[in-house]
Amino acid sequence: MFVGIDLGSRSSKIAVMKEDRSLELQKFDTMKFYREYSKIENNRFVIDLNSLELPAGAVVTATGYGRQAVPVKGARIIPEIRAHMLGAMFLTGLTSFTLLDLGGQDSKVALVRKGRVVDFLTNDKCAASTGRYLENMAAALNISLEELGRRHSNPVELISTCAVFGESELISKIVEGYTVPELAAGVNNSIFKRILPMLVKLRSETIVFTGGVAYNLALRQIIKDGTGMPVIVPENPDFAGAIGCCVDAANIG
């Protein structure tokens, strides 16, 4: 068997791939995952694979936001871009596409040609195009993420490029009398405006959208309309990194 671990900023994912390529998936809150499955070794926290009760003899590959801060003992470590590319390829069957991955605290775009990353861009300096931003904006509007993710019509223009000031701007728009659906659409549209330059620079025939933000139905539609490109969201898009790690493990196992 093969195991992939994606240590995300908001959640940690584990994928177990059996010999027939079927998958078992698990998700944990990242801080809870660290508390329950890490230990101090040589004055450093490490993920203890034994405590995860993984299949005996499994080949393990890990990636993610926290892979360097909290090493995974006994695992091969690969870059996030490679993990998400391999996961997207496995889930879609495609080998050439633009990969868009929006996670909890960073955003990544990669140009994939014939199964190889030929160029990529990433933004981990600002949370304004990430899941954390959507969580904050949904809370400010007092709606669920699911409700936020259904709104794309008549968007209010939001100009702030900072997640913190974006919340203040949203509150000012509420005071001005804009409706919640218009404001929610504005939030989704503002994410698109921030990622559009990366999508234009690394444009191809198809976008494969992964990461937790890919569950946002409105953003899918906005990206499709705004780029004129097909947008493919695979099943379990937030597990693409962990699944890609499984693929890597299977290739070296």
Image (tube, grey):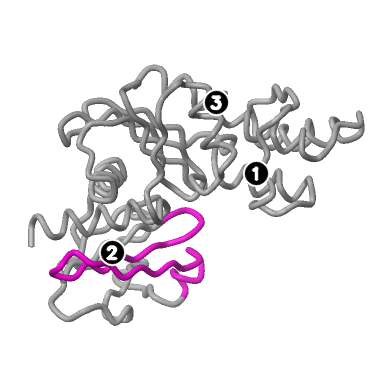
Point out the tag, 2 or 1, that comes first from the N-terminus. 2
Give neighbour class at mark 3: few <14, some 14-19, many 20+ (Cα, 10 Å). Answer: some
- Judge depth for marks 2 and 1 and give the one in front: 1
Q: What is the x, y in percent for residue 144? A: 70, 54
Instruction: Count neighbours of disc 2 (C-alpha within 10 A) and say few if under 14, some if 14 to 19, many if 20 or more.
Output: many
Q: Which residue is disc 3 drawn over?
A: 194
Q: Nearer the viewer, residue 1 or 35?
A: 1
User: What amino acid type should be assigned to the residue bearing mark 3?
Assistant: Arg
Sequence-first disc among 2 and 3 = 2
Q: Is residue 1 left or right of residue 99?
A: left
Residue 191 placed where, x, y %?
58, 31
Q: Which residue is mark 1?
A: 150
Q: Residue at x 37, y 48 (%)?
A: 234
Nearest the viewer among 86 and 226 is 226
The alpha-carbon separation of the residues under discs 2 and 1 comes to 37 Å
Left or right, residue 144 beside residue 239: right
- The image shows residue 146 at horizontal and vertical percentages of 64, 52
Whether residue 13 is in magenta: the answer is: yes
- Of residue 125 and residue 219, the one placed in the foreground of this image is 219
Could you say which disc has been placed on residue 82 in the image? none
Q: Residue at x 17, y 81 (%)?
A: 56
Q: Quadrant of residue 199?
A: top left
Disc 1 to disc 3, how far (Cα)?
19 Å
Tag 1's secondary structure? loop
* Distance in Å between CA atoms under marks 2 and 3: 33 Å
Query: Which corner quadrant holds the C terminus?
Result: bottom left
Amino acid type, callout 1:
Arg
**What amino acid type is highlighted by mark number 2?**
Val
Question: Which span of residues is magenta-colored?
Answer: 8-35
| Residue 159 sits in quarter | top right
The label on residue 72 is 2
